[in-house]
Amino acid sequence: MSATATNNEFSLLGHKPALFVLFFTEMWERFSYYGMRAIFVLFLTAPFIEGGWEWSNERALGLLGIYTSSVYLTPIIGGWIADRFTGYQKAVVLGALAMTLGHASLAFETELMFYLGVGLLIIGNGLFKPNITSVVSGLYDKYPERKDGAFTIFYMGVNSGGFLGVLLCGFLANNLSYSWGFGLAGIFMLLGMLQFWFGRNIFGEVGKEPSKKVDLSDAVDGKIEMTEEKVPANVQRDRYIVVGVLAFFVVFFWAAFEQASGSMTIFARDYTQRNLIGNSAMIFKVVDTIITVGPLAIITWVLIKLFAQTFSKISLSNIILGISFLSIWGIVIWKLSVILPKDNAEIEASWFLILNSLFIITLAPLFSKWWESKYNPSASVKFALGMILLGIGFGALAYGASTIPQGVKTASVSLIWLVLAYLLHTMGELCLSPVGLSYVSKLVPAKKIGMMFGVWYLAMAAGNYLAQFIGGYIDVIVDKYSMSTFFLIFTLVPISAGIILVILNPLMKKLMHGVR
């Protein structure tokens, strides 16, 4: 049985204040990752006169694929290092330091430093990603019924950072230089590292030492509380099978979803109407202002509530976090002062990437409440919904692109199709990604969590690599068939996978042995 929660323990929006310290730490890490990723392909493929390197789409997407897959591959090693040697907290800090140095290297914009920076980012992600999620898991191990909601809230931190990173790094890259975009990501990664380090006392013993020395909590199967040694071997075997099956389908999800940073960004740049005038420009500027200021105001409100409850405990961490947000507000005000006076509006190609994060911030609380209600569907059904919604989103793009003639290199398709696609993709992501982490933490014994999160990220690595490998054929497929055909590939495969998961649902529920 789960432990009885006290009101004081879950005093911040129904969750532990420590969760929101992790929320903001993850936010800055995702700021750096998504901010850099948003301008990665644009920088490599831009003409020399625009500050780019004039790489081909295929070559740029190839390097992106190596990077995005590797940052999910190295968590296997990072989780093992934390489990055996450093503990989760120290691994998070070491990873953040490596990523800070990586972003600094990218800002030099020389080929040697660029590759060095990418390498440091890969290493840093490996240490950071599995271990910060392991700390979240450790905080809620005695309250398994709250884990889905906790991970969904944590996922809002992921996407809050993604939203701000894409918005501001893209703005600096477009208005100053790509070096400024890469450099800004590094600055906030450094601040996130300091905020976490000086606030680590709020986590207590969770992740402080390697799990082989400190048993974070008893593993809970949803009905009976047992230690890892007492779990019947056949029950745990079945649960590992469930993790394996879900991880297999995760590959297909990310292979389609991660077109966002590759082929969908190319589609936004070359095939979408981004130059607006008159009323259209005014409407966009109003909407852009609202979606810039609105979410930032909400996050700031959460920040203030966190300060009210934790300032006496982790004051230096809160001060650093406050400085970070004042800096963000300063850049946002500058951005608006540059854009609003203009008569026209040219939408940056990277701008569309903020839609995913915006929709996450907006919809995550609703999905969190759904997962905590009596209507909470099983793991397979959640994953199936995610796959099907993802496929429908690409169906919208395929329909919107149906007017583009075969082989055409530029077009002006309405931006509404990209907006609709990102909305559906985000809903699919909320059904799969955050709850996937939660299910791993509930199905796997406590001492294996770091390693198994690494295995989960291995599946994501495979999906990310496939995404850019397939995306690299965009020019070939468009020349031989059409842009619509390219997006239909990513329509049919996820929907088919979703149908298979629905069929497997009764078996998967049986293999989970009571875990919800």
Image: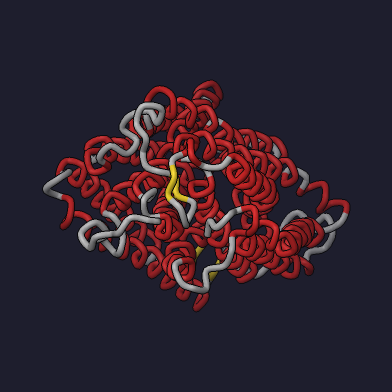
Compared across the picture, whether 446 is left or right of 476 comes to left
**From the viewer's perspective, is residue 5 above or below residue 251?**
below
The residue at the far bottom in this view is 279
Residue under the image location 41 percent in, 27 percent down: 212
Where is residue 443? Give x, y as percent. Answer: 53, 47
The residue at the far left in this view is 312
Where is residue 341? Give x, y as percent. Answer: 37, 66
Tell me the quarter of the image containing the N terminus. Answer: bottom left
Where is residue 474? Give x, y as percent. Answer: 76, 49
Residue under the image location 70 percent in, 38 percent down: 56
Where is residue 237? Give x, y as percent. Answer: 63, 42
Compared across the picture, whether 41 is left or right of 140 comes to right
- Image quarter for residue 103? top left
Compared across the picture, whether 347 is left or right of 14 comes to right
Residue 100 visible in rendering: no
Residue under the image location 51 percent in, 62 percent down: 355
Residue 512 visible in rendering: yes
- Image quarter for residue 61? top right
Residue under the image location 43 percent in, 35 percent down: 128
Identify the colour scheme used.
Answer: secondary structure
**From the viewer's perspective, is residue 325 above or below residue 179?**
below
- Image quarter for residue 274? bottom right
* In-front residue for pair 194/3: 3
Instruction: Give the tally of numbered discs.
Output: 0
* In-front residue for pair 70/239: 239
